[in-house]
């Protein structure tokens, strides 16, 4: 199979159901944001090089998020109204999984008393990058997916950004790096 098809040279691409759309279409923008966040998760996971129980847990968790984001991309690329085949979809169970991981991590993290600045370890910084891209995906989804059938995807994107924030804090905790709190006095 060749990696290049030349079918996108005119600025259009195919959705899963074969429908041709402009690469500037909101659905393609949403797919791109999901893909970009997934790439940031790959960067984060690749920075976890120690063979340690907590590193392994975090790496495995990031891969689980990546797999769900791949399903989310398929969900977006296969419009329910035109796709006749059985395509895996994001469900409320995916959101529940995010909430369970958030709750387990939050029980171990220091209480949040202020906003924190993105950063810390390379893993945490990458997770904050992924979080902001997921927030963009969510904004695109709000504009594009007004359909109640798509609310599971929208809820999942919202919860995924919360999860990535929590996992960034967890990555810092695992490496003993404190979160940097923002205060209004720190303007320099």
Image (tube, rainbow, N blue to C red):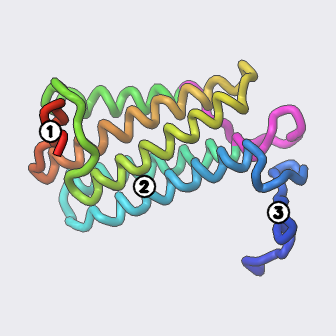
In the drawing, what numbered circle is on residue 186? 1
Left or right, 120 with reference to 88: left
Question: What main secondary structure does the magenta stretch of the protein show?
Answer: loop
In the image, residue 179 lies in the stretch drawn in magenta:
no
Q: Which mark is residue 11?
A: 3
Mark 2 or 3, closer to the camera: 3
Residue drawn at x 42%, y 43% as measured from the top left? 131
**x and y, in percent, of residue 176 in the image:** 9, 49
Kindly indicate the quadrant of the structure image that contains residue 89: top right
Q: Position of residue 169 (x, y in %)?
A: 23, 41
Camera-nearest residue between 96 and 117 = 117
- Disc 3 packing (10 Å; few <14; some 14–19; many ≥20): few
Boundaries of the magenta span: 75-92
In-front residue for pair 45/60: 45
Q: Quadrant of residue 147?
A: top right
Residue highlighted by disc 2? 41
Which secondary structure lies at badge 3? Answer: loop
Q: Nearer the viewer, mark 1 or mark 2?
A: 1
Residue 141 found in image quarter: top right
- Label 2 packing within 10 angstroms: few (<14), some (14-19), many (20+): many
Compared with 147, 171 (above or below) is below
Q: Earlier in the sequence, mark 1 or mark 2?
A: 2
Q: Residues within 10 Å of mark 1 (few under 14, many from 20)?
A: few
Dot 1: element: loop
Would residue 53 be found to the left or right of residue 19 on screen?
A: left
What secondary structure is found at the residue carrying circle 2?
Answer: helix
- Whether tag 1 and tag 3 are in contact, CB under 8 A, the answer is no
Q: Residue at x 21, y 65 (%)?
A: 51
| Mark 2 in CB contact with mark 3 (< 8 angstroms) | no
Total marks placed: 3
Upstream in the sequence, badge 1 or badge 3?
A: 3
Q: Residue at x 15, y 42 (%)?
A: 180
């Amino acid at each position: 199979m060749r990696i290049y098809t030349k079918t996108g040279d005119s600025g259009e691409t195919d959705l899963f159901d074969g429908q041709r759309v402009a690469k500037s279409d909101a659905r393609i923008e949403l797919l791109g944001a999901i893909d970009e966040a997934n790439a940031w998760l790959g960067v984060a996971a690749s920075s976890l090089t120690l063979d340690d129980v907590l590193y392994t847990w975090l790496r495995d968790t990031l891969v689980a998020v990546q797999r769900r984001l791949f399903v989310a991309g398929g969900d977006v690329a296969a419009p329910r109204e035109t796709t006749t085949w059985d395509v895996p979809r994001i469900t409320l169970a995916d959101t529940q999984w995010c909430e369970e991981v958030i709750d387990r991590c939050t029980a171990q993290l220091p209480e949040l008393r202020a906003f924190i600045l993105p950063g810390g370890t390379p893993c945490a910084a990458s997770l904050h990058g992924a979080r902001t891209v997921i927030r963009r995906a969510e904004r695109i989804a709000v504009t594009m997916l007004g359909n109640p059938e798509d609310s599971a995807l929208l809820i999942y994107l919202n919860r995924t950004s919360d999860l990535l924030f929590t996992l960034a804090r967890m990555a810092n905790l695992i490496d003993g790096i404190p979160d940097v709190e923002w205060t209004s006095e720190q303007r320099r």
